[in-house]
Amino acid sequence: MGYITEKGRKNLPTYTGGNTIDKSLLYKYIVSPSCNVTATGFVCNFIALFLMSSYMRPVNDGQEPVDDSSFRWVHFISAFFIFFYVMMDNIDGKQARRTKTSSPLGELFDHGCDSFTVGLATSVVGLSVGLSFWEILFTFILSTIPFYLAHWEEYFTHQLILGMFNGPTEAEFIVILFCCISGVFGQQFWFQHVTIAENTFQLKELMFYVMCLSSLITSFQSIYSGCKKAIDMKISLITAFSQLLPFTSFLYLEFLWIIVSPQLFLDYPILHILTLTFIFSYLSCRCIVQRICSEDFRLFYKPLIFLVFSVANSIGLKYFGFGLMEEKFALFSLFTVSLVFISHFVVKIIGEMCNECLYLLLLLIKNGLVTNEDRQFKADVLVQDGKVVDIFPEGSNYKLPSNDIPVVDATDKLVIPGGIDPHTHLQLPFMGTVAVDDFDIGTQASISGGTTFIIDFVIPAKGQSLLEAYHQWRKWADEKVNHDYSLHVAVTWWSEQVAKEMEILVKDYGVNSFKVFMAYKNSFMVTDEEMYHIFQKCKELGVLAQVHAENGDLVHEGQKKMLKMGITGPEGHEMARPEECEAEATLRAITIANRVNTPVYIVHVMSKSAAHVIVNARKEGKRVFGEPIAAGLGVDGSHMFNCDWRHAAAFVMGPPLRPDPTTKDVLMDLLASGDLHCVGTDNCTFCEGQKAMGKDDFTKIPNGVNGIEDRMAIVWDKGVNSGKLTACDFVRVTSSTAAKIFNVYPRKGRIEIGADADIVLWDPKATKTISAKTHHQAVDFNIFEGMKVTGLAQTTIVAGKVVWNNDKLSTVKGSGKFVPRPPFGMVFDGIDTRDKVRNELLRKVERAPYQPPKN
């Protein structure tokens, strides 16, 4: 039987690396800058212990410190070897684990080495400063507790939080520092007495007490966080704490053995510490494997049986005069057995992880019609490690690297790049409540509909730091997303601080699009002057300016007018925001962008008037892009006039859906002609109870509708099935164009060698009737309710793994990654030339100085 359960085998290939938050100042400012290559070498710790134990010994009560005057170099050499390990460990952390690019085996290696280091480093520093055996032992035990609890906590929180001052990096540097002090002054330095509050301590005792306090603080932090998350996950605390049983059993048995046979450990101190280190490392590694593989915790492990035997043997000899062997042989036997167990684990787990991951990360899609924006052709597609590695056109003779590669049959299916939704608002705090589709539920829904990449919006409050808001959104999303994502950032106010933060977001965090609101007066709305400065900054940074285009002042006055007339229902929402308000703002935004000479992207184009403004501007050569959304292509605004308030309120969004039933056809026509560009959703969902906040005042109804799940099906049904779009057009408007505009093409938005293996098998004949009862979103209403659509995602592949197949989801929460988007994408092609041409037309007129008329 292997170390990984059947459940774990299924979950292992989906693991993409944990979410470590390392607040350590030493890591940030000293270690990290020099971490440039990946290496291994914790064998240095063994060398350090071997050297130190060869020359030094524990200084027990009544003994004098070791006279190390002739071999103080041992302290320095040991410090160097531990320093070397620290650097190697942080290199691994910098380039793999802490950037969420770690493989399961890489992460296990990283933290497995750390678990060994707990015993080795505490022994080295204990021998160096002259601790007694008991002090070394308790230092070891006190170091194991926070280490194990941190990984127990991570099982629930999916975050390994390393403290700012009491993390492993600090502990290792303290070991190095103490060894160096011993090297300079000798071990006797630590036997000096100091007086604190009338109490006298030896320096080594003071050091021991400080380590105890630090360990307790860190341990309580882990227990609190783990329990809090377990409660959130509806896991009983009894179950959560039962998962600590192997470790607590280890501690209990160890203390019992010490009490029964203290002399045994005084005679063989280093052997004892090494034995405990092997057992502790085994338990820690099993805990890490269970987290990586999302397995249930096991309550007992075989090495503990042999520890029980050793303790029982000592009890028998001491109290009953009977035992199977002498105590020293029991200790030697336990050392041998624990070494065998950890060695067997290391060898076996490497094989298991490699076998489970290597070919499960390979996938062959056979017999499909590969469809990109520009061509279709029959081919087989080979995927490995989340990338498309080969494409074999029909009739090709090709050889696969293994006969065990999983095959997905795509006969009669289109093999298309995963959909890209450039406009979502998941988990958005808005109008006094929070959107019910969070990053977990929302991305599950998107996957079921064939979308594999979204770009959500960070929306800071007016006056709030953009960076602060960005990090908040990252925190919400990183632990929940089921596929890759990125973030736009809204600019809701203007200052020099905002300008600097925009630059940081672009250069350090991969943001290449910023949005302004011309609506939501007294909230998100910016003035024309502010918009001009924001557009200038966007141009300077090479990032795309996005605009919510509505005349906020006119909307505000329209709302007051409706309420004064007694129109308080959802219909007042549309009447207060007529399409001329949208068209005027669209023209104004394009005009300002044109004056700056920067590209502009109009989000959620909802009316014919606004769409025609964009079309006319493009005819004049202005760099403007228009985004219709699924709601505007699938339904109209007449629903807001429905007599059922619940039904009407469900359609409230901004800008509003237009009552004109021909609007959706015109928007689809312009999408087909290329005058509008890519389809978003503006998915921002609120349940009936939330919408009811505005039951007596439509201005208090939270704005937003669904679409993230049904977008692809709506576009296919209304576009391709009507003959307005071809299959290649479908890929263009649902994926490729968005990838180009937001500069992630061809990594996303195309099926070609080297692209991300985010792939959808699209069944053009599959049908379903859309309903809130069957959709995967959290919202209790669907604006497409009852609509029968033909053309659906049969299979969705994310990062090379099948996560949606035949109406079944198999996603892994938090498995998606943030995708940084570089500036100066294709939307900026030719902007410099335009500037040059325009500037050549701006010439000063030379004239004689003005002379006033003579009287």
Image: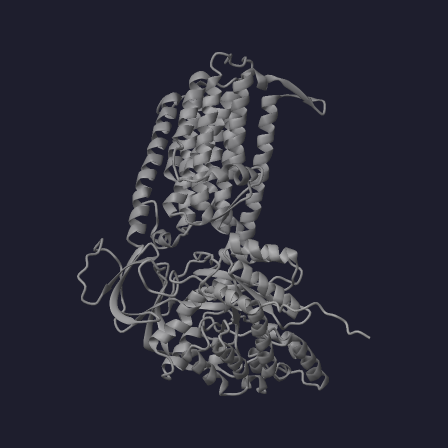
Question: Residue 222 in the image: x percent, y percent?
Answer: 55, 44
Q: Residue at x 54, y 71 (%)?
A: 685
Height in image: 359 above or below 91? Answer: below
**Residue farthest along the front direction in this orientation:** 854
Please identify the quadrant where the C terminus is shown: bottom right
Examine the rendering and report whether any part of residue 312 can be seen.
Answer: no
User: Horizontal placement of 105 versus 828: left or right?
Assistant: left
Query: Residue 172: x and y, percent?
Result: 51, 32
Q: Could you tell whether 722 is left or right of 454 in the image?
A: left
| Relative depth, front residue between 320 and 838 | 838
341 vs 831, nearest the viewer: 831
The quarter in which the N terminus is drawn is: top left
Q: Nearer the viewer, residue 318 or 667?
A: 667
Q: Give the residue drawn at x 35%, y 56%.
A: 386
Q: Judge whether 829 appears above or below 322 on screen.
A: below
The residue closer to the viewer here, 659 or 495, is 495
